[in-house]
Amino acid sequence: MGFKEHCFKKSLWLFHFAGASCNNCDIEILDCLTPRYDVERFGMLLVGSIRHADVLLVNGSINQRDKSRLLELYEQAPKPILVVAIGACGCTGGIFAEGNTFAGPVDKIIPVDAYIPGCPPKPEAILAGVVKLLNK
Amino acid sequence: MAEQLFYFLIFPGLLFAAVVGAFLSYYDRKITAWVQFRKGPPLFQPFYDFFKLLLVKETILPKYGSKGVFLAAPIFAVFGATAAGVFILLPLLGIETGFNGDIIVIFYLLTIPSLTYIIGSLASGNPLAAVGGSREMKLILAYELTFLLVLAGIIQKAGMTISLNEIISFQTINGAFAGSISGIILFIVFIFCIQAKLALVPFDMPEAETEINHGIMIEYSGTPYALVKLAKYIMLFILPAFLISLLWGGLNFEGIHILWSVLKILFVVLLLTLIRNTNPRVKIKQALRFFILWMNLLAILAIVLSYFGY
Ligand code: SF4
């Protein structure tokens, strides 16, 4: 593993995009930053600006209105960027998959690097997904 | 010439100050983690962050901004921080004596990073960056006078000398200024000025991560942001070093004194970190009031006290 890649994997900054979620996944993502799970151990930080992000966390169902925003965010992000779809909604659409404003799961809109299923996934599951992403 | 370049680029300039500053930044994050009962980042985290931004990430230029100025601002920030660092560290580490009046020069050079952040943020054409820039401007207006008053107090205590080297040697003979009442007051005021200069939490409204999404830094990505980080690392080292050389008798690198010198720097950074972890962000109005009224009054009180020999 080269030096560049090592630095990149050791310092992933997260940007959180919530689509039309039920707000449960958002809370579980924030749980990962709390003292009990503490993702800063792996050098991860939650950043507020997409320009600083290395990982785009997407959760919630993506409806018509979110779609353009998600695309715009993805284009604004400095490459390389990893995309993680969190929760049943992000991976497949979950209970919203049949809804008439639903605009497809995340991987129909932008390329996704990791899927973390669950409704909502436990913080442990999110961490496990992140570790898998790091070993990829 | 070669010697000057060595001073500026390697020791005690860019390279040395940046490496020490990066470790101090790690220390700051680790203490923060401990305060919040977390484990915190690994030892080389600041280096990973820096090299990731420098080597891996793409640089995005704002569409509706002034691109040249946007890119030049971080370079000038690093330059200003390094130049100030060289002038502070040369007398402090006992390499050269500096020149007469160098604290005035240092005072101006220390303002350059904040100024360039403002210029860069306004050049990015982002409305949130403009909000951050205007806040940073107000903050500078608030703390700069206080900072000047503190320097005035120190100059008065040192018998009207404006050379950093003479202030340090004055303290080695007569004891550190922080040992007197006026010295302690100046120390407290100086700590708050550093806090505002570094934009750490009670005074982090220019960056206000949760409110205006990193404000002045919002458009920076890739290499320019790495340079901003570099300037921040350097500032995190040289401002406490400046405080120590002005009020706490400087550093000493003979035998066991090395340990004491390192502890001094760690203690000052610890103070900054604890203040940042135990306070909420204040509004810009409150910050102005805090500096212009209370801190200036305290600094003037210290000057008066030191005039009467306390
Ligand atoms: S996956 Fe489940 S918990 Fe998460 S946003 Fe969708 S419905 Fe809510």
Image (spheres, coloured by chain):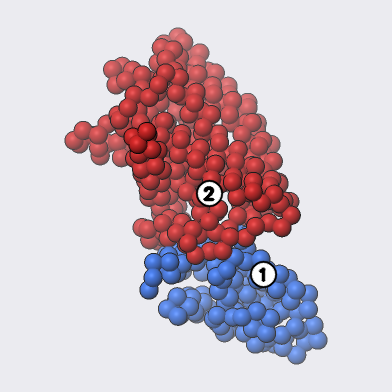
x, y percentage for residue B154?
45, 20
Residue B238 visible to the viewer:
yes
Chain drawn blue in the picture: A
Give the letter of the chain under mark 2.
Answer: B
Task: Please indicate whether residue B9 sits to the left or right of residue B215 in the image.
Answer: left
Residue farthest to the right, as pictured: A100
Q: What element carries label 1?
A: helix
Give the letter of the chain under mark 1.
Answer: A
Residue farthest to the left, as pictured: B255
The residue drawn where x is 63% and y is 26% is B293
Q: What residue type is labelled 2?
A: Val
Residue under pointer 2: B228
| Cβ–Cβ under 8 Å for marks 2 and 1 | no
Residue B196 visible to the viewer:
no
Residue under pointer 1: A75
Residue farthest to the top, as pictured: B308
Q: Label 2 to label 1, Cα distance in Å? A: 23 Å
Q: Relative to B54, say whether A12 is above or below.
A: below
Share a chain, discs 2 and 1? Answer: no
Chain drawn red in the picture: B
Assign the N terminus of chain A to one quadrant of the image: bottom left
Residue farthest to the bottom, as pictured: A98
